[in-house]
Image (cartoon, rainbow, N blue to C red):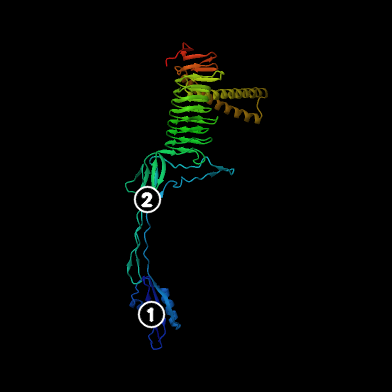
Amino acid sequence: MMPKKAEVKISPDKMTAFMSFQFDEADSEEINIGSLERILSDNDVRFGIDKEALLQAFSLIKEKKDFSNLVVAKGERAKDGENAYIKYHFAKDKNKVTPKELEDGKIDFYNISLIENVVMGQLLLEKIPPTPGLPGKTVTGEVVYGRDGNGAKMPAGKNLFVSEDGLKAFAGADGHVKVTGGTVSIETVYTVNGDVDFSTGNIDYLGNVVIKGNIREGFKVVSEGTVEVYGTVEGGIMQAGGDIIIKKGIRGLGKSRITAKGDIYSMFIENAYVESEKDVIVGEAIMHSVVNSGSGIFVSGRKGLIVGGLARAEKSIVCKNVGSSLATKTQLEVGINPKLLLEYRRVDEELKITSENLDKTRKALNILGALKQKLGTLPTDKLMMEAKLISTQEELMNSFEILSVEHKDLEEKMEGLKDGYIEVLGSIKGGVEVTIGKYKRHFSDEYYKSRISVVDAEIEVSPAVG
């Protein structure tokens, strides 16, 4: 028989039950595990009872040791649900300037990637839904409930479309991502409010680009759409899938390369390479540059001048003045598609090299053939050489055949391009060389208000009709 005095306390949140025990000589009731469980039940402790804690209490009682606030039961806490959140499928911090370190340790300030290009249909935002709260239970057996997670608003703005279930947002147009006040939009025009320089890095954009300043030396602008430059291109590089409009002009410094699938407009072109699949329209002058047009080159304004370099157009060149009083070499070519001409020259060069290599291979095989006839058989190293030369000859013959067909096809296409003309509304100075189709003429004398075209297989000069 053991005297005892037991007490049970429950925490205010009803998540923990404590037992204390004190001997009382006047009480002789026998204690066992069952009686400890009844004590808990009599004190409303019905859940989360710790069997090991009861065994510990029973052991202490047997040793006649008092104890206090022994944890004998724990409730199961409710769990709050997770809040919904937005998963971004693009770099949100693209507007931060982050120059890259190159392999040699130098820092690349040209390609700092400020633009996040996207294409129509690209997944940009994904809402991860909230999760429900999970219920718990107190030591007294009461159910407690966790809070459900909060929802989240899909931050889809202009040019984004949201899926029917509201969980995904996609780009509704080609362009670049813009995040304003947490809202994600797609802009189809990329605007640079100053110069393209170290503050912006190179521009590579899927849509239209507007540059309100200049393009500085060494920097590049690439666009799938139209590029408009309010200032000048100063040794910069441009490439556009549409038109290029340069309001003040191109000062190429011998470094600028401007190419467009659409028209190119510029106030002037100086010391640059310019190539357009359509028209090149210039406000004042083309000076010491290479200009290729898949259609026409038009130079107007007060001077309307082409001097130095090469101007090449498939259909026509129209200007006011060509050349200079210093007889500066100035080449004008029409009646030839620039791309077609360059491709023809490439194939022509490859055909010549292939023909030369084929001739060398055949001569080497002839030498081995003569040696074989003399010796009756060839040494092992010469046999290996012969086998390699035979294989090379077959490859070269195949290449020669393919290039010959391509060469003939390009020749026929170029033969059909002979209706181009040049119209000069002012003067043509000495030093000007004109090519129309396959015909060529050098001008040593000065001509005025002239139309230059091919008549009866010759380049002739007639009065301008403009």
Residue 364 at least partly seen: yes
Q: Is residue 3 above or below residue 351?
A: below
Q: Nearer the viewer, residue 393 or 289?
A: 289
Near mark 1 (Cα within 10 A), the count class, few <14, some 14-19 or many ≥20, is some
Residue under the point 51% across and 33% down: 236
**In the displayed image of the protein, which residue is found farthest to the right?**
375
**In what quadrant of the picture does the C terminus appear?**
top left
Q: Earlier in the sequence, mark 1 or mark 2?
A: 1
Instruction: Please provide percent x and percent y for residue 291.
Output: 50, 25
Q: Position of residue 109 (x, y in %)?
A: 53, 41
> Are the two marked residues, 1 and 2, in contact with CB atoms closer than 8 angstroms?
no
Task: Answer with left or right where residue 401 lies relative to residue 29.
Answer: right
Q: Nearer the viewer, residue 149 or 353?
A: 149
Report which residue position mark 2 lands on: 127
Residue count near mark 2 (Cα–Cα under 10 Å), binned few <14, some 14–19, many ≥20: some
Foreground: 93 or 270? 270
Residue extending furthest toward the top: 456
- In this figure, which residue is indicated by the disc labeled 1? 7
Three-letter residue code for mark 2? Lys
Can residue 404 be seen here? The reply is: no
The residue that appears at 40% across and 77% down in the rendered structure is 19
